[in-house]
Image (spheres, helix red, strand yellow):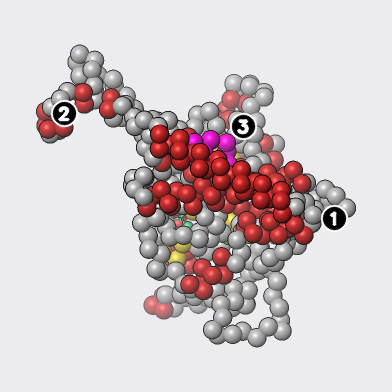
């Protein structure tokens, strides 16, 4: 097993494992690193134990923020004399992808409030290091399976901003021809197998994709098939049965998959600590016979190192890995959420750990990029995002005939009449479903 429990030096300057013994706790000041018997990660909530059951707290020693990491991080050969984990080109690529994710989502918020998007829209602000850290390591044929928080995963995998924005606008030029919307990004071309509105729904799809890769390679003898599947989902989803069932099957069949938990501490308004018997999700990996890794998800370089090892392990045919990324969403659960439940101190703590600012600082300190180079990337992305909005706005809405397409397998079913024409094209169609 290549993964082991160990602490690692923080590649970025924000060292979440540091505990300064001289610091006196200030009751007015939120200090997530202060050792406490009842706090977890950066949450300000206390772990509560049911007094009626008289069960004593199982663990009175709070683990450090990063409790298990890849050995590869420690053994990593330096890219340069400065002992850096990335080259300049790699750093610029990571920066560009994170800026794209952030700028795109900020624009989505604007467009949503201007009434250009419909239904629920869930943004990814704050979590970019996870998408970028993992997906930028993939090959084109590898698969990504997401959740309803899916725009940025699609962008990282290469789906053009125009196609994602148009999909959000419900336009015919969207990656699902406007038929999916925010929660259902899909691209056959880019092997993005979907956003999914039901939590946990994507995990079996991802497991199936990983199974198909293994089947093609080992049964159909397609020797060049070495695709890896990444399944992204949240902390709240890890209490869903599909998660456990799929961990079992993936470990049993040594499937080429990485289960990536984006633990942002909240499932809508439910704190992870209140909902989960053992909040350390990564521990569930070893229970199924696969490595479980916990990584600082606000640090793209750490995420990337862990991702590298997990993806390579899957590609080598050694089976799945469960990676828990400690992260945080900077906005409410969806754009309809006023976000009044979370403690402002907790929000402020994570805002100060913005993964984009951290990478920027790291690159500047290590002379990997000048201020001008980073500004040029920001400018370029601003134009890409602006262009995506103009494109989406000018694109046509889907034809009415598309309304019932892909709804029924039988083309002569509910949607298509005996004469072969769409029933919705009947002028009386909107008068009531009884006649349809
Ligand atoms: C099967 C199912 N049950 C309930 C819901 C309602 N629901 C929507 S989001 C959500 C919370 C999910 O939280 P988490 O997995 O942590 O993801 P996050 O939103 O934090 O990214 C729930 C319960 C759902 N979409 N699907
Ligand atoms: Mg969550």
The alpha-carbon separation of the residues under discs 2 and 3 comes to: 43 Å
For label 3, being within 8 Å of ligand 1 is answered no
Q: Residue at x 24, y 25 (%)?
A: 415
Q: Is residue 98 above or below residue 160?
A: below
Q: Give the camera-side residue of 260 and 57.
A: 260
Residue 156 falls in which quadrant of the image?
A: top right
Kindly tell me whether residue 9 is visible in this rendering.
Answer: yes
- Pointer 3: residues within 10 angstroms few (<14), some, or many (20+)? some
As helix, strand or loop, the secondary structure at mark 1 comes to: loop
Q: Residue at x 71, y 48 (%)?
A: 373
What residue is pinned by disc 3?
A: 140
Q: Which numbered disc covers residue 429? A: 2
Among the two numbered marks 1 and 3 on one chain, the one whose residue lies closer to the N terminus = 1
Residue 158 falls in which quadrant of the image?
A: top right
Kindly tell me whether residue 94 is visible in this rendering.
Answer: no
As helix, strand or loop, the secondary structure at mark 3 comes to: loop
Among the two numbered marks 2 and 3 on one chain, the one whose residue lies closer to the N terminus = 3
Please name which of the two marks, 2 or 3, marks the residue nearer to the observer.
Answer: 2
As helix, strand or loop, the secondary structure at mark 2 comes to: helix
Q: Give the camera-side residue of 183 and 210.
A: 183
What residue is pinned by disc 1?
A: 82
Q: Which residues are magenta?
A: 154-162
- Pointer 2: residues within 10 angstroms few (<14), some, or many (20+)? some
Among the two numbered marks 1 and 2 on one chain, the one whose residue lies closer to the N terminus = 1
Q: Is residue 356 magenta?
A: no
Q: Position of residue 213 (x, y in %)?
A: 58, 30
Q: Position of residue 114 (x, y in %)?
A: 36, 50
The alpha-carbon separation of the residues under discs 1 and 3 comes to: 31 Å
């Amino acid at each position: 097993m290549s993964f082991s429990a160990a602490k690692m030096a923080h590649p970025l300057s924000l060292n979440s494992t540091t505990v300064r013994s001289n610091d006196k706790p200030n009751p007015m000041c939120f200090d997530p690193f202060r050792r406490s018997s009842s706090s977890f990660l950066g949450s300000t909530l206390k772990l509560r134990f049911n007094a009626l059951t008289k069960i004593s707290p199982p663990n009175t020693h709070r683990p450090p923020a990063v409790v298990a990491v890849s050995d590869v991080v420690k053994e990593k050969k330096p890219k340069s004399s400065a002992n850096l984990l990335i080259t300049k080109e790699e750093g610029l690529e990571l920066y560009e992808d994170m800026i794209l994710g952030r700028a795109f989502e900020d624009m989505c918020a604007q467009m949503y409030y201007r009434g250009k998007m419909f239904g629920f829209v869930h943004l990814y602000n704050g979590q970019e290091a996870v998408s970028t850290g993992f997906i930028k390591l993939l090959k084109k044929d590898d698969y990504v399976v997401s959740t309803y928080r899916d725009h940025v995963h699609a962008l990282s995998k290469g789906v053009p901003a125009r196609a994602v924005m148009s999909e959000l606008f419900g336009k015919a030029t969207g990656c699902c021809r406007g038929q999916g919307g925010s929660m259902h990004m899909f691209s056959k071309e880019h092997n993005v197998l979907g956003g999914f509105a039901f939590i946990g729904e994507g995990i079996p799809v991802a497991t199936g994709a990983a199974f198909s890769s293994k089947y093609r390679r080992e049964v159909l003898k397609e020797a060049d098939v070495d695709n890896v599947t990444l399944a992204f989902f949240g902390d709240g989803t890890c209490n869903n049965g599909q998660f456990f069932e799929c961990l079992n099957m993936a470990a049993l069949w040594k499937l080429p998959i990485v289960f990536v938990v984006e633990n942002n501490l909240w499932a809508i308004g439910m704190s992870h600590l209140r909902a989960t018997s053992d909040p350390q999700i990564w521990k569930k990996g070893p229970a199924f016979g696969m490595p479980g890794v916990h990584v600082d998800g606000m640090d793209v370089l750490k995420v990337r190192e862990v991702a590298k090892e997990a993806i390579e392990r899957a590609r080598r045919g050694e089976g799945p890995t469960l990676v828990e990324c400690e992260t945080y969403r900077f906005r409410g659960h969806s754009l309809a959420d006023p976000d009044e439940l979370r403690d402002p101190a907790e929000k402020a703590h994570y805002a100060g750990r913005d993964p984009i600012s951290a990478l920027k600082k790291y690159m500047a300190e290590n002379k990997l990029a000048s201020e001008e180079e980073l500004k040029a990337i920001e400018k370029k992305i601003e134009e890409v995002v602006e262009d995506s909005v103009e494109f989406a706005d000018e694109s046509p809405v889907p034809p009415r005939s598309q309304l019932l397409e892909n709804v029924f397998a039988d083309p002569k079913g509910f949607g298509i009449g005996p004469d072969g024409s769409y029933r919705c094209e009947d002028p009386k169609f909107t008068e009531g479903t009884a006649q349809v």
